Image (spheres, rainbow, N blue to C red):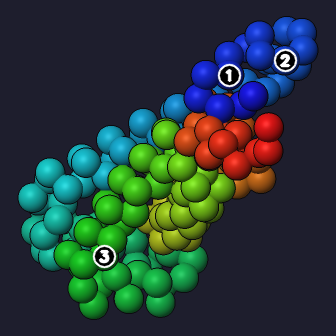
Amino acid sequence: MGGLNAGPRARGGWKESASRLSLLPLRLFLGVTFIYAGIDKLTDSQFMAASGPGSIGELMSGVRDSSAIPALVDMALKNPEGFAYAIALGELAVGIGTLIGLLARLAAFGGALISLSLWLTVSWQSDPYYYGNDLAYLMAWLPLVLAGAAVFSLDAALAARRRPR
């Protein structure tokens, strides 16, 4: 049990089912959100530019002096377009892995790293700190890093296939 078809009644009562399914809404939200964020960046030619209004270069230049680690911003500014593609493709990979539950812990770890890097650079200056959404995303990824995707996931389906009958 625990594969793609394991529904709420697969084992135990409603409390156990609720417990097993508790991370599913978080997984769906983060997966869809990161897929959308990656696609949004990749399809926005202004954002993917090194300079100009709304560009990644302008954004990174604007947060450089207020970031927690200016050296990270300096690295991004050496090749703003490359950094933009890395973030966008990373968000897309993390979102897909999280949504379908393939290498779910690794995908969640990648999501946590992306959120941590954005918190330390782009949203670090948010005052009060809880206005910066990247910190909340970082905290949201941690349960998935720890627990993975136990239900309705390719990880669970593959684990079920490996189990001896």
Can I make out residue 37 in this image?
yes
Dot placed on the residue nearer the N-terminal end, 3 or 2: 2
Residue marked by disc 2: 11
Q: Amino acid at mark 3?
A: Phe
- Residue 55 on image: x %, y %: 18, 65
Mark sitting on residue 136: none
The answer to whether the residue labelled 1 contacts the one labelled 3, judged by CB atoms less than 8 Å apart, is no
Residue marked by disc 3: 83
Q: Residue at x 44, y 47 (%)?
A: 95
The answer to whether the residue labelled 1 contacts the one labelled 2, judged by CB atoms less than 8 Å apart, is yes
Q: Residue at x 13, y 70 (%)?
A: 49
Residue 52 appears left or right of 96: left
Residue 86 appears left or right of 104: left
Residue marked by disc 1: 6
Figure check: 30 above or below 18: below
Q: Amino acid at mark 2?
A: Arg
Dot placed on the residue nearer the N-terminal end, 1 or 3: 1
Out of 135 and 103, give the one closest to the viewer: 103
